């Protein structure tokens, strides 16, 4: 089953969110408007808004409230991607030129800042202090994660704990917050929204590890960028870390730099795939996915719970 089919009963509300996203990024500055719209139109799975809506189904669901939270979380995600592309000096995202490629680094950074600010403005419509505290903490952690990503580029002596801490901040916490804030906006009791947070965290970890595996196992056509781009840009992910347990492969990976010819990167990708590192990474992702599914069993039974289970399994076990 395709991902969109799993939550097709939310289609009318998702359309409302898409319209709200486009309305929200309007700006007096034509340049900011164009750069923000370019980011929005690049597409995306809208995973975070979907988690917001599904979490809201455990309480008093009102799309007029839910849409503000859903759009705010997607805007934070969009802003972090714009900043990431500057950090990684990325020319393409989802097969389209990045903001930094279409304009420049300065425009990209200010566009990311603008989109971040819009998310905060939207959340003022939610009269719940706990929600604002969670969102503020999440934004701080996402920003720290961006700094950690810069610090860890081409740092080949990092370990698995460093990597897991980084992807927690880069991906998992925002998905966790999406689940929790969606529930809070729908007046879900604390014990339930805390479980939804844990579910989102575990799913987010599995999701990012899977993404990092796909960077080595998918084609350029499927990725919208060359395979192995993460490694070429100095981002040391789970497959590379597991492969570096082999001293010979470690020596090859430690030669990687931004100036390395892509043909040599392809050879290193081949070594990583032959090393058993992909299988170890899949096992790591599966452990987080299993934890997410265990937490889900503690939640009340409804259509949203079944959909969360289906989505978790889908995004944690995408094609390798």
Image (cartoon, rainbow, N blue to C red):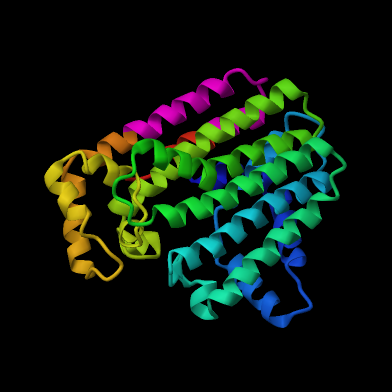
- Residue 58 appears in the picture as rendered: yes
Residue 80 left/right relative to 117 = left
Task: Tell me if residue 253 is in the magenta stretch.
Answer: no
7 lies left or right of 224: right
The location of residue 122, given as percent across then percent down, is 80, 55
- Looking at the rendered image, the quarter that the C terminus falls into is top left
Q: Position of residue 97 (x, y in %)?
A: 48, 74
Viewer-closest of 270 and 157: 157
Give the magenta range: 283-309
Q: In the image, is residue 238 above or below residue 86?
A: above
Percent across and percent down for residue 69 are: 75, 47
Residue at position x 34%, y 46% in the image: 213
Q: Decide: is 163 above or below 266.
A: above
Q: Tell me, yes or no, if residue 47 can be seen here.
A: no
* Residue drawn where x is 64% and y is 21% of the image: 299
Residue 64 sits above or below residue 153 on the image = above
Residue at image location 75% in from the left, 24% down from the top:
190
Main SS type for the magenta part? helix
Q: Quadrant of residue 177?
A: top right
Report if residue 296 lies within the magenta region: yes
């Amino acid at each position: 089953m395709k991902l969109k089919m799993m939550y097709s009963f939310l289609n009318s509300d998702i359309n409302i969110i898409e319209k709200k996203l486009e309305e929200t990024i309007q700006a007096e500055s034509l340049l900011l408007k164009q750069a923000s719209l370019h980011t929005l139109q690049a597409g995306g799975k809208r995973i975070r808004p979907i988690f917001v809506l599904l979490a809201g189904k455990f309480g008093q669901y009102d799309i007029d409230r839910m849409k503000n939270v859903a759009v705010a979380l997607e805007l934070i995600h969009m802003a972090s991607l714009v900043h990431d592309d500057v950090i990684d000096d990325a020319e393409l995202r989802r097969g389209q030129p990045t903001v930094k490629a279409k304009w420049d680094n300065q425009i990209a950074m200010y566009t990311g800042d603008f989109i971040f600010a819009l998310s905060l403005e939207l959340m003022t419509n939610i009269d719940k202090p706990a929600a604002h505290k969670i969102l503020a903490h999440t934004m701080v952690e996402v920003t720290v994660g961006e700094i950690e990503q810069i610090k860890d580029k081409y740092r080949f002596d990092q370990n698995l704990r460093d990597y897991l801490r980084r992807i927690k901040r880069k991906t998992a916490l925002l998905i966790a917050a999406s689940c929790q804030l969606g529930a809070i906006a729908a007046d879900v009791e604390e014990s339930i929204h805390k479980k939804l947070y844990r579910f989102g965290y575990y799913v987010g970890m599995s999701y990012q590890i899977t993404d990092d595996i796909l960077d080595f196992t998918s084609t350029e056509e499927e990725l919208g960028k060359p395979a192995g781009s993460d490694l070429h840009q100095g981002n040391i992910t789970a497959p590379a870390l597991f492969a570096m347990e082999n001293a010979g492969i470690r020596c090859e990976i430690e030669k990687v730099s931004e100036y390395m010819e892509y043909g040599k990167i392809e050879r290193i990708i081949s070594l990583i795939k032959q090393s058993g590192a992909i299988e170890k990474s899949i096992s790591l992702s599966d452990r987080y996915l299993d934890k997410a599914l265990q937490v889900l069993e503690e939640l009340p039974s409804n259509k949203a719970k079944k959909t969360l289970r289906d989505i978790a399994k889908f995004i944690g076990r995408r094609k390798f």
